Amino acid sequence: MIYNFDEIIDRSNTDSLKYDFAEKRGMPEDLLPMWVADMDFRTPESVMEAMGSTVEHGIFGYSESREDYYLVLEKWFLTQFNWQIKPKWLVKTPGVVYAISQAIRAFTEEGDGVLIQEPVYYPFRQTIAINNRKVVVNQLAYNQGRYGIDYEDFEACILRGRVKLFILCSPHNPVGRVWTKEELVRMGDICIKHGVIIIADEIHSDFTFSGMTHYVFADLKSEYLEQTITCTAPSKTFNLAGLQISNIFIANQNYKKRFKEEMAKGGYSQLNIMGIIACKAAYQYGQEWLRQLKVYLEDNLEFVRNFVDTELEGVKLVEPEGTYLLWLDFSGYLHTHNLSDQELNRLIVHEGKLWLDDGNMFGLGGQGFQRINMACPRAVLSKGMEQLAEALKS
Ligand SMILES: Cc1ncc(COP(=O)(O)O)c(C=O)c1O
């Protein structure tokens, strides 16, 4: 079967955060939304069929996953990443951010430092701050259009900030890096040396471009496995974010107990039945759909790369190795036109009629950047890029 990712599906009036809440979020109503990280593609047929059968059955009582669910996960992680999981490691949560928050509460005290690498997915900072922990930032190094890690600063941050926990974003949103084994090991060894627990947020791991390999951090060394909370989900991969299902792996049973106790304090136990059904069907039957989707996304990337080169003077695309989020560097444009980020935002929203994510939201190092979601039909992407070009010309 050939999947048609060119189909434009009207998402308005579907209670979609991306399409139906502009005004509530302080934006004009008529914007083309290319911000939040969900896709404008329908989930695979097999997922819809499985959910359809559940709807038809009509009884939505308390639900729990059975062994078949675990076996599907086991096969997925083995096939995709050569990672052998174990049943006793699994904790299911209604989302990765929820899991990160529980881990922060379970493994740190108020006032402790939690390390992140900005610019990074902004709920990391928010979740640390709202739990009254200290945000400690090892800012990513940006050299000649590529992001890397300043290891000296990484270690200094841990010492200086009384860091107990590190939130690794792998692959990295928004800069699009798929970390190499060497990079992960250098960070991992520093964490082990200082007794820092690692939350490895690997939610984007299914989106790596040709030639790139995602390494499961916890699988690189046995010491890492004992000290890592690995966060995964089918939500980005199969566009299921609204179903709130994620699979967290904690090999260290003492840590798992503490994590589950924290969840229990919040009164959470069983998942939504639709999440369980969808996750199982997606991982069981979705591999070919994902393969074709990745080909489509690489073509989208190629389209944007060419467009930026030829039409957006002063703008640079930070070449992504994974994820469907693009990180555009507007610093040249801002400099030439003597504009501030606010003025750029105004142009994008009011002249371009586009809704992107302002780089400043992602923390340190985000100034002068915008994040754009390319997981949409090519015609929509092309329209968005044209609107951006118009905005910049105006
Ligand atoms: C790095 C990262 N972690 C977590 C999430 C959200 O996960 P969830 O919806 O499961 O809380 C996102 C969504 O964009 C993300 O980019």
Image (cartoon, rainbow, N blue to C red):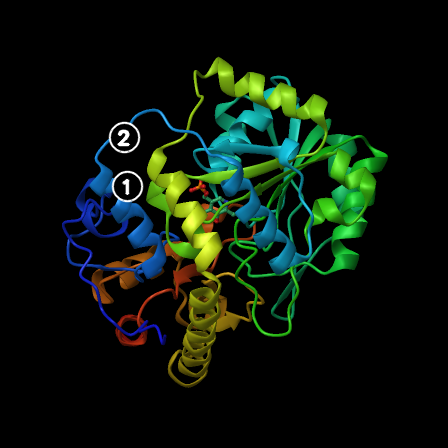
Tell me residue 156's x, y (percent): 78, 39
Q: Is residue 65 left or right of residue 87?
A: left
Residue at image x 51%, y 53%? Answer: 366
Determine if the C-beta at disc 2 is less than 8 A from ligand 1: no
Dot 2 alpha-carbon crowd within 10 angstroms: few under 14, some 14 to 19, many 20 or more: few
- The answer to whether 30 is drawn above or below residue 299 in the figure is above
| Label placed on residue 54 | 1
Q: Nearer the viewer, residue 369 or 322?
A: 322
Q: Is residue 96 left or right of residue 109?
A: left
Dot 1 alpha-carbon crowd within 10 angstroms: few under 14, some 14 to 19, many 20 or more: some
| Label placed on residue 77 | none
Tell me residue 11's x, y (percent): 20, 56
Q: Nearer the viewer, residue 95 or 24?
A: 95
- The answer to whether 316 is drawn above or below residue 257 in the figure is below
Q: Quadrant of residue 62?
A: top left
Q: Quadrant of residue 32?
A: bottom left
Q: Where is the N terminus found, in terms of image quarters? A: bottom left
* Amino acid type, callout 2: Phe
Tell me residue 393's x, y (percent): 29, 76
* Amino acid type, callout 1: Thr
Farthest top residue?
265
Instruction: Kindly indicate whether the residue at mark 1 contacts the one at mark 2 (C-beta within 8 angstroms).
Output: yes
Q: Which residue is mark 2?
A: 60
Q: Is residue 380 left or right of residue 207?
A: left
Tell me residue 195's x, y (percent): 80, 30
Is residue 59 at least partly visible in the picture? yes
Distance between mark 2 and mark 1 Cα atoms: 8 Å
Circle 1 — which element?
helix
Q: Nearer the viewer, residue 130 or 70?
A: 70
Farthest bottom residue?
310
